[in-house]
């Protein structure tokens, strides 16, 4: 079970290490119905195939005088039949894909794995944002150790009263105990330096950019302050996203000047961003010197794009949507050592993934990551928080006690 972008790569590597095995790659949810399990030794499928096999209905009920909703899920017959195949093992690559407890993908994987004796999850970033994200992975791999979500959250996720007095699980607690259970029973972790003999240096550099005009930014900032004071948390988060876009518009000219200078020193650079408009701006400015990987990039075209970036001399830039070019993208490190981040993502795992496009086996040069951030803006706050949260996740994975808060709450505190 893998991200769609690496299905063919898995097939290639499996053939390399286990020649002679009969491998079936499944494309599209309908393909799961048409196969003879006796004809194949290995099935490779992507997570995106699974959601259509889970039917959801909603039931309304009342508890303590309050109206509540319950989601009921039913697995379709086709997936039931597929799960009845006596698989000996399942490998879940980028296992953090099942982190959301409400996602159909998680419930389909849970059903599919319940009779499989050996379950192996792989990930460089198993916790994407907070410890609570970890439960689904642990529950599927070792349900005997982690059978109950509520108990896990109360013990290991730093429960605190939050919005309107509701209990929230956005932190970490008893991390040494959790780490001990993980390392003794189910988790094998390696640092990059453990598996890479000649790991290159990496330098992160924050480049402060002065906004061309602060008037629009200050107006939006005041709107957010007013929303925070009125208790409109959800709407204030939307406004924060708008604030980030305003920062990009006001810093764009200087950012491109910086990139122009980089292109006089380096033959290839990656540019990471979140919005289609930013990639369009990059294409408009640099024309044929740009290739792109975004949400519309087809799986079969991805390696062609990477090959063109690596081999065509006039192609200098690969413009990357951070999410689309994150997990499962390999080869950009072959001829590139520089990345520019124009827009920050919201999770520390996304930061690690974008930096990981260059910090991979095959990289022979000193890696440079430039974060072009608006001076005295929300971007500086976000980066500081993301970096802190990433370090906290690292501490969870090594068993140290940490205190972690919600990203939005920390932003609000900084605004206050």
Image (spheres, rainbow, N blue to C red):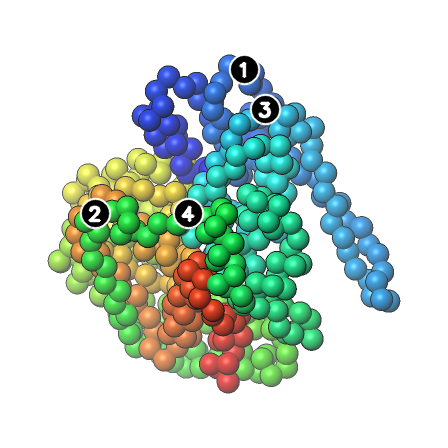
Q: SS of the residue at dot 4?
A: loop
C-alpha gap between disc 4 and disc 1: 33 Å
* Residue under pointer 4: 188
Q: Which of marks 3 and 1 is nearer the N terminus?
A: 1
Q: Which of marks 3 and 4 is nearer the N terminus?
A: 3
* Residue under pointer 1: 38
Is 345 placed above or below 39 here?
below
Q: Residue at coordinates 43% horizontally, 78% vertically from top-left?
A: 217
Judge from the rendering whether residue 376 lies leftward or rightward of residue 207; answer left or right.
Answer: right
Q: Earlier in the sequence, mark 2 or mark 1?
A: 1
Considering depth in this image, is 297 or 27 the residue closer to the camera?
27
Considering depth in this image, is 162 or 216 the residue closer to the camera?
162
* Residue under pointer 2: 197
C-alpha gap between disc 3 and disc 1: 11 Å
* Label placed on residue 204: none
Q: Where is residue 46 in the image (x, y as percent from the top left)?
A: 50, 35
C-alpha gap between disc 3 and disc 2: 40 Å
Judge from the rendering whether residue 168 lies leftward or rightward of residue 301; answer left or right.
Answer: right
Q: Which of marks 4 and 2 is nearer the N terminus?
A: 4
């Amino acid at each position: 079970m893998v991200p769609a972008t690496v299905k063919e790569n898995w097939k290639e590597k499996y053939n390399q290490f286990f020649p002679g095995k009969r491998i079936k790659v499944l494309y599209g949810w309908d393909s799961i119905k048409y196969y003879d399990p006796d004809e194949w030794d290995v099935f490779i499928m992507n997570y995106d195939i699974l959601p259509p096999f889970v039917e959801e209905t909603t039931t309304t009920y009342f508890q303590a005088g309050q109206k509540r909703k319950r989601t009921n899920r039913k697995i379709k017959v086709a997936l039931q039949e597929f799960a009845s195949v006596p698989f000996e093992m399942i490998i879940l690559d980028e296992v953090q894909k099942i982190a959301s407890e409400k996602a159909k993908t998680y419930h389909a994987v849970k059903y599919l794995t319940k009779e499989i004796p050996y379950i192996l999850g792989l990930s460089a970033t198993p916790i994407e944002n907070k410890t609570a994200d970890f439960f689904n992975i642990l529950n599927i791999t070792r349900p005997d150790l982690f059978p109950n979500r509520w108990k896990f959250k109360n013990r290991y996720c730093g429960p605190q009263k939050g919005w309107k007095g509701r209990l929230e699980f956005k932190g970490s607690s008893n991390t040494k105990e959790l780490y001990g259970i993980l390392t003794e029973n189910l988790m094998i972790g390696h640092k990059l330096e453990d598996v890479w003999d000649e790991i290159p240096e990496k330098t992160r550099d924050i480049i402060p950019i002065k906004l061309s005009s602060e008037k629009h930014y200050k107006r939006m900032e005041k709107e957010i302050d007013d929303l925070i004071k009125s208790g409109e948390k959800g709407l204030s988060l939307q406004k924060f996203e708008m604030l980030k876009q305003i920062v990009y518009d006001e810093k764009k000219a200087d950012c491109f000047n910086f990139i122009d200078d980089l292109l006089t020193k380096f033959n290839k650079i990656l540019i990471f961003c979140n919005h289609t408009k930013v990639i369009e701006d990059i294409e408009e400015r640099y024309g044929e010197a740009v290739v792109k990987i975004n949400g519309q990039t087809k799986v079969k075209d991805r390696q062609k794009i990477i090959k063109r970036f690596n081999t065509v001399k006039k192609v200098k830039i690969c413009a990357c949507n951070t999410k689309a070019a994150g997990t499962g993208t390999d080869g950009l490190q072959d001829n590139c050592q520089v990345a520019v981040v124009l827009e920050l993502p919201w999770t520390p795992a996304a930061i690690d993934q974008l930096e990981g496009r260059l910090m991979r086996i095959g990289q022979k040069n000193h890696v440079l990551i430039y974060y072009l951030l608006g001076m005295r803006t929300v971007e500086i706050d976000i980066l500081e928080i993301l970096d802190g949260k990433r370090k906290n996740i690292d501490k969870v994975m090594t068993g140290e006690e940490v205190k972690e808060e919600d990203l939005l709450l920390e932003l609000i505190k900084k605004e206050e």
